[in-house]
Image: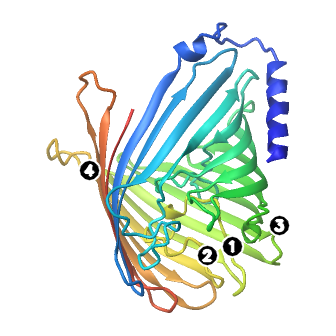
Amino acid sequence: MRRFHYAVILLGTACINFSPSLSFADEPEALIKDGKLFGELRHRYEFVDQDGIANDANANTVRANLGFETGNFKGFKGQIETQLVQHLADEHFNDLHNGKTTFPTVADADVIQLNQVWVSYAGIPDTEIKVGRQALNWDNQRFIGTVGWRQNDQTFDAATIKNSSIKNLVLEYSYIGNVNRIFVGPTPPDDLNSVSHIVHGTYKFADFLNLTGYGYWLDFDNGASLSNRTYGARLTGEAPLGKDWSFFYEAEAATQSDYGHNTASYDEPYYLIAPGIKGHGFTFQLGYEELSGDGTNAFQTPLATLHKFNGWADKFLTTPAAGLEDAYISAAYKVSGLNNILDGVTLNAVYHDFDGDESGDFGSEIDLSAGKSFTLPESGQPFKNIDLLVKYADYDGEDLPFTDTQKFWFQIGTKF
């Protein structure tokens, strides 16, 4: 952490001494006058039935975020955000902190914390520098993300530089001094003491071809087994198919090895291919993702928004030592042309088939969801929408240690 604080001081000093001829507010009052309050309220009920655990989990939790983002003053801007997570009623779930080990895990422990606090500077042409506790969501969040599904965000004490001075090219670098995880700790640890570096660049050749290259050097002194070095490339794009339909795709390859405090020795690849089509409110996609393993060590993504990947039942938050192959198919439809209640409802269905990298049947999963955002009338209140979501996950395990698991969620939330 000391090295991170030194980096903050150096970057801040450099920004103050730089005086470009860009147009920003000249009065410090603009920081408050042009600033804005923001916040979020989100309640979730989560039910979990997992074979091999005596009781079912019934978790009622709420999260409340409240923050303020300043206006611009000579290129400077700042933000502060607090976050509260609190269970309602009895704790009939294991939050990994309350000792309720006869219940399945719902990793939403009570906490009140400083979620984000950062200062940014945009006074250098085509460049933004941000220093402090911040959200980082890179690409599809497969490697770095805020874990937005859980009630407690994952944020990063980091220094980030973003530059877009070359047409169609965005270059980014982050130094991460600490990872503020979704856990309360001490086991799993709520913080990862980090000396980590991220290099990321995206070039847009055309709508149908975006090329991203990246390198992640992650080193944690209190999470040695999570430390790794990853290099990779990612292709994304979209192209029209006639008047009403379009084709889109993701393709990615990476290689990962041990790094820093990690005493293991491994070198494993990662592959993703996921083409799809969409039109008339429908989206269809096929996908294949492989995180390789050698039976002892496997390709891991410890800072990812893991709930987005390999099934909503969260059975593969850690890649098995034998690796993981996930072949999946998804379909979505946004309802339109019916009535005011149903129009705008988004329906999703996903089927996953899981196998080991070399051998082993790791089961299958069906995921279903329905959600809609309802616009609220403007009557002097700050809230614009009410967001409703219902989700269900049914994981069918085949070989031990993978156990059958069913999960159900109901969520309601609003932002201002």
Location of residue 147 in the rendering, given as x and y in whole percent from the top left corner: 53, 55
Residue under label 1, please give it: 299
Identify the residue at horizontal 25%, vertical 24% (top origin). Answer: 378
> Of the residues shown, which amino acid type is indicated by label 1?
Phe
Residue under label 2, please give it: 319
- Sort mark 4 into few (<14), some (14-19) or many (20+) by Cα contacts within 10 Å: some
In the picture, residue 269 is in which quadrant?
Answer: bottom right
Identify the residue at horizontal 61%, vertical 75% (top origin). Answer: 319
> Of the residues shown, which amino acid type is indicated by label 3?
Tyr
Q: Secondary structure at mark 2?
A: loop
Distance from Cα at disc 3 to Cα at disc 1 = 13 Å
**Front in this rendered view, residue 361 or 8:** 8
Is 261 placed above or below 361 here?
A: above
| Sequence-first tag of 2 and 1 | 1
Location of residue 309 in the rendering, given as x and y in whole percent from the top left corner: 51, 65
Check whether the beta carbons of the residues at disc 3 and disc 1 lie within 8 A of each other. no
Distance from Cα at disc 4 to Cα at disc 2 = 33 Å
Which of the colour schemes (rainbow, by chain, secondary structure, one colour) is used?
rainbow
Q: Is residue 380 left or right of residue 253?
A: left
Q: Secondary structure at mark 1?
A: loop
- Between marks 4 and 2 in the image, the one whose residue lies nearer the viewer: 2
As drawn, the label of residue 259 is 3
Is 311 placed above or below 1 here?
A: below
Q: Secondary structure at mark 4?
A: loop
**Front in this rendered view, residue 48 or 370:** 48
